[in-house]
Image: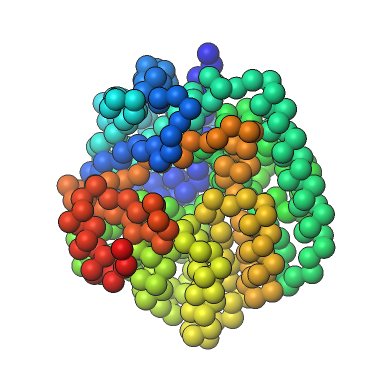
């Protein structure tokens, strides 16, 4: 079988942007990342162990190609020293271990953060593709194409009927949980051909390069979570992370993620200084309308015109939900919709709900306090309770 990973460039953009920021600000950080499957698969993922080992062996032999490095250099927010680092970078097999726990698959990456943080997306889409190879049939792809055509028809019909102040724009965020590389490639090419007015980019840097799309992404939870271990007062970790981001990117990549310790705690730190400097906010847990109204209320309180800002929604979106949110918000604020599994893995088979998250940093536990049930992540219940207390986050 062909290896799953086609290129080291086939990663989400925010991995590169966080990678650069952390390499510059905290290059000696040691971290642990762990794989979790949140739902019940059609067959035990432990059966994939040997295939995953082989795929990781292949990944650790790969390098960035010259044309890929040249592409990264022309992204103005990536600095030359970071791309120079990538010219010699190789994943180290010694930093990642695969095992089984009963019928469960275990994957743990431990080592220098700038060497192990990049494993996450590759592990997730390797596991997905290995898993779905056993379930794929010709009928599955036919069904996927039928569903994709139906979604395109809905967007062509419904968006044209809208008369909102700001345009409808959506992006492909489907790399980590895609059905396969070939299918995501087909989906992105089809959306670009059929919906050029609405389809504005992809988080997949490899496909952005291939199709001349804008690569989309800024930061993920791991970036802010890491700051829980960086020696600042815990109550101030979000402000420290946002400040370092501002200093690194100087106005680029201005969408801030809000749900590491909940939206209320985030807004308490997102004062006039940050609200003016950042272009907008990204939603990834909790009720999106409640979240968006809180954001607009916050901008109003700071006397900032919300029409100059953008709210990006990316929490398990489908087309219907994106259109609903667009109708609700698009007369008051610019919007954007990052749609993942609903585009890259809607073929009639239940997708895997898998993640690979940071669990410790510099020997200390780190945590995400989600606004949605089931998305809070932490292996240390004592630290989790302390974090809840510090940020007054409800159970």
Q: Nearer the viewer, residue 270 or 265?
A: 265
Q: Residue 283, how many percent across, how many down?
A: 50, 61
Is 174 rendered above or below residue 7? Answer: below
Name the residue: 68% across, 20% down: 138
Q: Nearer the viewer, residue 67 or 309?
A: 309
Q: How many marks?
A: 0
Name the residue: 20% across, 57% down: 383
Q: Residue 316, how many percent across, how many down?
A: 54, 50
Q: Nearer the viewer, residue 31 or 75?
A: 31
Q: Residue 15, how many percent across, how many down?
A: 44, 45
Report the side of 174 relative to 219 (left or right): right
- Which residue is most to the top? 1
- In this orientation, does residue 330 appear? yes
- In this orientation, does residue 241 appear? no
Report the side of 187 relative to 25 (left or right): right
Q: Residue 250, how many percent across, how many down?
A: 46, 64
Name the residue: 79% across, 57% down: 158
* Quadrant housing the C terminus: bottom left
Name the quadrant containing residue 389: bottom left
Is 339 rendered above or below residue 312? Answer: above
């Amino acid at each position: 079988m062909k290896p799953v990973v086609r290129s080291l460039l086939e990663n989400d953009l925010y991995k590169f942007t966080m990678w650069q920021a952390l390499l510059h600000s905290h290059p000696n950080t040691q971290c642990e990342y762990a794989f979790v499957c949140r739902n019940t698969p059609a067959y035990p993922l432990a059966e994939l162990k040997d295939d995953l080992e082989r795929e990781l062996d292949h990944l650790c032999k790969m390098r960035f190609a010259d044309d890929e490095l040249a592409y990264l250099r022309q992204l103005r927010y990536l600095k030359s020293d970071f791309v120079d680092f990538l010219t010699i970078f190789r994943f180290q097999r010694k930093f990642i271990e695969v095992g089984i726990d009963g019928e469960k698959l275990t994957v743990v990456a431990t080592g220098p953060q700038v060497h192990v943080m990049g494993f996450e997306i590759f592990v997730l889409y390797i596991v997905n593709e290995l898993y779905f190879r056993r379930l794929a049939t010709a009928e599955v792809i036919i069904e996927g194409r039928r569903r994709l055509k139906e979604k395109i028809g809905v967007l062509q019909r419904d968006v044209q009927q809208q008369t909102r102040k700001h345009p409808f724009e959506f992006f492909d965020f489907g790399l980590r949980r895609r059905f396969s590389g070939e299918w995501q490639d087909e989906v992105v090419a089809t959306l670009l051909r059929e919906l050029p007015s609405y389809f504005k980019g992809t988080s997949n840097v490899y496909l952005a390069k291939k199709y001349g799309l804008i690569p989309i992404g800024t930061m993920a939870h791991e970036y802010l979570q890491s700051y829980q271990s960086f020696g600042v007062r815990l109550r101030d970790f979000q402000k420290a992370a946002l400040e370092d981001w501002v200093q690194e990117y100087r106005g680029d990549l201005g969408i801030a993620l809000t749900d590491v310790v909940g939206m209320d705690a985030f807004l308490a730190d997102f004062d006039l200084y940050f609200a003016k400097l950042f272009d907008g906010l990204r939603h990834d847990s909790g009720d999106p309308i409640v979240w968006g109204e809180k954001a607009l209320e916050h901008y109003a309180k700071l006397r900032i015109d919300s029409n100059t800002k953008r709210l990006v929604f990316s929490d398990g979106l489908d087309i219907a939900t994106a259109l609903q949110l667009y109708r609700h918000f698009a007369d008051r604020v610019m919007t954007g919709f990052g749609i993942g599994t609903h585009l890259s893995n809607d073929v009639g088979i239940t997708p895997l709900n898998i993640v690979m998250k940071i669990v410790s940093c510099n020997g200390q536990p780190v945590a995400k306090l989600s606004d949605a049930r089931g998305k809070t992540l932490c292996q240390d219940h004592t630290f989790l309770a302390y974090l809840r207390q510090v940020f007054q986050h409800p159970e």
